[in-house]
Amino acid sequence: MPPVTSDAQGKRTPPRGITRGKPGPPRQSQAREGGAQTGQGRPPGAWHPATMCELYSKQDTLALRGKHIGPSCKVFFASDPIKIVRAQRQYMFDENGEQYLDCINNVAHVGHCHPEVVKAALKQMELLNTNSRFLHDNIVEYAKRLSATLPEKLSVCYFTNSGSEANDLALRLAQQFTGHQDVITLDHAYHGHLSSLIEISPYKFLKGKDVKKEFVHVAPTPDTYRGKYREDHEDPARAYADEVKKIIEDAQSSGRMIAAFIAESMQSCGGQIIPPAGYFQKVAEYIHGAGGVFIADEVQVGFGRVGKHFWSFQMHGEDFAPDIVTMGKSMGNGHPVACVVTTKEIAEAFSSSGMEYFNTYAGNPVSCAVGLAVLDVIENEDLQENATRVGNFLTELLKKQKAKHTLIGDIRGIGLFIGIDLVKDHQKRTPATAEAQHIIYKMKEKRVLLSADGPHRNVLKIKPPMCFTEEDAKFMVHQLDGILTVLEEATGTKTESVTSENTPCETKMLKEAHVELLRDSTTNSKENPSRKRNGMYTDTHSLLSKRLKT
């Protein structure tokens, strides 16, 4: 949208070319610069104030959304949604100019509205945008650059527009190559919104009216904190992999053959789960022995988010390489671009079917220019090193909070992909679901955006833009510390290392927190778990040595 301009008398005038109906003239507001002290208050802004334009008031926008947008399309914080009118780097701004620290947006991978990405899109859009049936350098240059980040055998690219399209195509590739249909997926997995992917996503089909299809087999999530085999197991990687082996044997005994095993390299919607070291190698061994292929879903966790490695599956060592890798989300920094990368053998088998693969917008010159710009920014701004440094710093801060707050059961993560598992009881590891929902709303009031997910919706997810700083980490943890302290005291769960004498104001806050939590808990028990997205409610307010080392 063009910027709001000023007339000769200095009055704000709306941008040209916008047609309005009844709502009247646009509302303008001015973003405020940050100016917080380290670790407290609001994090410092990274840019200068600028004007913003709205077509409608917030209430009118809500009303129009209710009228014209499908009711299953939900918003964050439905009881009090945030109307975001612009963003820059790791900050988002509402219609009043209030600044929010974005801790959940792994789509704006190199930072919201990064100028180099915007410039690349604009430059190419002014020159040419067409489909990939015409020869153009951008698509081959982008495919070459992507392939260079992957194991040598992964050299053939198929571009798509979304992670869902990429995972759907990956299934087609696997089934054509193997001649089999059956797919093994992980419990709580989510791989996309297409029908073919809902079928293999327990995160979705177990919450709706769908039933598991006969060709879909669900393996236990390799969760060493809350899963079947935990951190005290002598070899959780083998134990979880043997569960996959048993599924294969049972399927074969019933006359079924496995086409693929698909898993996120680190499970996101499943609760920020990092598989134990050696798990993927053993699974790949079993899958290949059954004639299937291994699909690594990097849609949420790729492009350097783990810091040390460009792809999350690379954490498992050089002796592991999937047969198909899917990517999306962060790939275009908000622009719709995604990809499937596979081996020459699988690609040739797919071509031998005689069916052409053509996707109108996939791999177009603008999308590829955007993708190339994202790769450049990751390299030029050393964002992988930033993910390592800031991620380690944030993890250490959170571990200190774990020692202080009894609500925190586990801190797990690598790079800028971190989960905070909230529990009511450390011994039983009882999920603190209502508390998690309470916390994300309270964090929003403190201008920090978090979400909660996992099978019990009790895991706070941290996956911010890769430009996230140590100052941002301090600010986020400072706000979380305050909210946890009030919440634990309100519910009679004292912090383990800190006691305090409450002032009248604090006593009021404690009572309010307790009342809100009770209301959240009562409401949550009635909540249909399928009616929420990314762990946020949409209808109401609401010993780790066996882990993978990097």
Image (cartoon, rainbow, N blue to C red):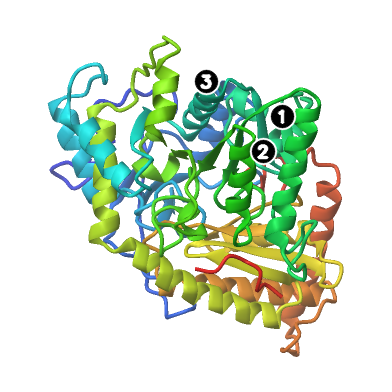
In the rendering, which numbered label is found on residue 83?
A: none
Residue type of the residue flagged with mark 3? Gln
Tell me the SS state at disc 2.
Answer: strand
- Residue 127, how many percent across, how many down? 12, 27
* Residue 4 occupies quadrant: top left
Q: Are marks 1 and 3 in contact (CB under 8 Å)?
A: no
Q: Which residue is mark 2?
A: 185
- Residue 317, how many percent across, how many down? 48, 59
- Residue 518, how many percent across, how many down? 84, 59
Q: Are marks 1 and 2 in contact (CB under 8 Å)?
A: yes
- Disc with the residue nearer the chain's start (1 vs 3): 3
Q: Which residue is mark 3?
A: 176
* Mark pair 1, 3: CA separation: 17 Å
Q: Residue 127 or 362: which is nearer the viewer?
A: 362
- Disc with the residue nearer the chain's start (1 vs 2): 2
Residue type of the residue flagged with mark 1? Val
* Mark pair 3, 2: CA separation: 18 Å
Question: Going by the image, does 433 lie left or right of 278?
Answer: right
Mark 3 residue crowding within 10 angstroms, few (<14) / some (14–19) / many (20+):
some
- Residue sitting at x 39%, y 69%: 469
- Residue 500, how many percent across, how many down? 74, 89
Q: Is any atom of residue 388 visible in this view?
A: yes
Q: Nearer the viewer, mark 3 or mark 2?
A: 3
Tell me the SS state at disc 1.
Answer: strand
- Residue sitting at x 44%, y 34%: 56
